[in-house]
Amino acid sequence: MLPTRASRALTSAVSCALALLGVGCVRQPIVSTDELPVHRVVVYRNGVAYFERAGHVDRDEVRFKMKQGEVGDFLATLAVMERGGSSVRAAAFPLKTEEDQEPADDEKPPPRTEDQKKGLETVVLSLDGKAHDLQVGYVAESPVWRPSYRLVVHDAGDAELQAWGIVENLSGEDWKNVKLSLIAGAPLAFQAQLGTPVIPPRPIVTDEGEVIAAVPRGETTLRQVDMPAPAPPPPPASAPAETAPAKDEAEGQAVQGLRGAGSGGGGGRRAAPKPARLHGADKKVASSTGPGTPGAPPMPAPMAEGYAQYAQPATPAVSPPRNLQSLAAVAAEGGSTRYDLPLPVTIPDKSATMVMLLSRRVSGEALFLYAPDGGVPDSSSHPFRVARFTNGSTGILERGPIAVFEDGAFLGQGMVDPLPPGATATVPFALERAIAVDLDRKYDEMGERVYKIENGQLTIERDSVTQTKYRLRNGGDKAAKVLVKHPRINGSRLASPPPGTEDNVGTSTALIPARIAANATADLVVDERVTMRRPADWFSVIADNAVKAYVADPKADAGAAQKLKAVWGVRDDIVKKSTEKAKLQQESETLSASTEETRRNLRAIEKNKTAEALRQKLTTRLAEAAARLDDLNRKIVELDSKLAELTVQFKEAIRDVNVVVAPSS
């Protein structure tokens, strides 16, 4: 026979299974109350939603039933407002203690209430009277809303962008005619456990006596003469009166609801909203602000203002799509984007709905992108077909799927990464095999520039050049525009990039455009340069080129350039005489070798009586060579003396030259 505790668990499981065969186990709401219906829901992308309940209460308390795991979040984010001010005395809730644990197997369990059987706890809001118009807001877990996009590409770089939001209701109750807002962001929202008692351990103090082993040191402030008294705090500034909206702006107002349902931070709080625009009509949306002085923490609006807003029907302006009421008012607040639907929606429990957030004409086109991807075979040889568009809205577009259409046909699907306002997305959706790409690279060092002259030392800049050549072949019968996603070398710069190049620093890539005629081949050369600095010999060709370029540069320091020009005359004389000396030395070495060979030949025929004529010829040659060697040695000595003088003169002159050039960009 099974133990008693196991028997109870088995009985519960069997009961639920039998119920599933019948009417099904009833799913309990996360938070429920009979007094206040759900009036507004704000869904985030971090697993929580802000719920606002509003209504008239004729009792001195409001009872909320919720799952045990939701008590902490409810208490941590609870915000209550009423016409004329808050009237809540306390929020009472039960605690689970050791006495509430299941009894031993031999004990009879106490009777359980229906709420206990369902695992529900009750939080009671005690009020100071019986007639109240209340607004209650709190945060509870909820599925994230998910975006989905459509892009219809037209001619001449024009496109139609639609954004939809998919909202799922798993709260356990129907959302009937609620004001719905979607937040494109994930503010910090943690699980609170305020409903769980916490008793921290305390230190044990003995009665053996306590002795302070060291005398603590105090702090002393010296008296100051004529010390000014602290200034009284300035009186609070009165809030400026709001300017009445113009007629055309008033027609586009969107209902905002409780101020606590915003996007600025965790717990569903938000800062005072900024003016937004209705997409497709460019009409400013007027947003009401909550009470309080400027700079005060955001608080929910009082009931008078809140219900006045709810009573005002929204009248959006008319532009494509025909019913602008299906579009949301968009506002960027606190680094997040907020979509407020102007009309109430109904989402039954355990169901989902898809609402249109915006429909807008944007800059967009369908083209090709060469971006090799290790997960896509053949992408190293062929480009992707891509949709490219600019986010022309005032808010960020969250990551989500996008369907692309052109000329009345479906082209494919891709994934849009988070896209800030004004940013451009390039979304691949297919591989184009009619275009082939191959590449080649070569490396070199080019250019020489003066970077610094200090203490007679020359430092120059040179460019380490990497040239990547893309060869694109178009086998189709139409001209093609291809964007090449080029991986950038760390620390390099693009030299003379083609017009339209987008250098994306954040991703270390560059998008470089190229056009290929039908059935043709085009070459695209990407030139990247990294600046290197190194010491240089004053008498090298690189130094000569760098200094002459600096002297000829109109942006160079005039005084330094004039000194360098004068010094460079001495340097050129040294180079000229050094070259002359090198030639003389070369001739001397060659003549010395020839003379030595002539002497060996004379010794070989010294005793040959029949070689008198040859001996005379070699003797004459040896005498002429000796005379020439003497002349060469004399000239070399003279040049050495002159070079020594010029070298000292050059070193002394170059010490007076100091140059520091701004680094090349």
Image (cartoon, rainbow, N blue to C red):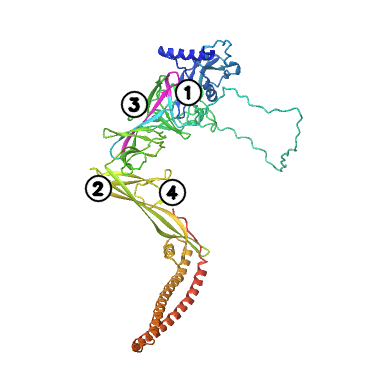
Q: Earlier in the sequence, mark 3 or mark 2?
A: 3
Q: Which residue is mark 3?
A: 323
Q: Circle 4 — which element?
A: loop
Q: CA distance from mark 1 to mark 3?
A: 28 Å
Q: Which residue is mark 4?
A: 490
Q: Are marks 4 and 3 in contact (CB under 8 Å)?
A: no
Report which quarter residue 361 is drawn in.
top left
Q: Which residue is mark 1?
A: 51
Discs 4/3, front: 4
Residues 73 and 107: in front is: 107
Q: Earlier in the sequence, mark 4 or mark 2?
A: 4
In magenta stretch: residue 168: yes
Mark 3 is surrounded, within 10 Å at the Cα level, by few (under 14), some (14 to 19) or many (20 or more) other residues, namely few
* Residue numbers of the magenta segment: 157-179
In magenta stretch: residue 618: no
Question: How far from the left and from the top, in percent, is residue 7?
Answer: 51, 13
Q: Which residue is mark 2?
A: 520
Q: CA distance from mark 3 to mark 2?
A: 48 Å
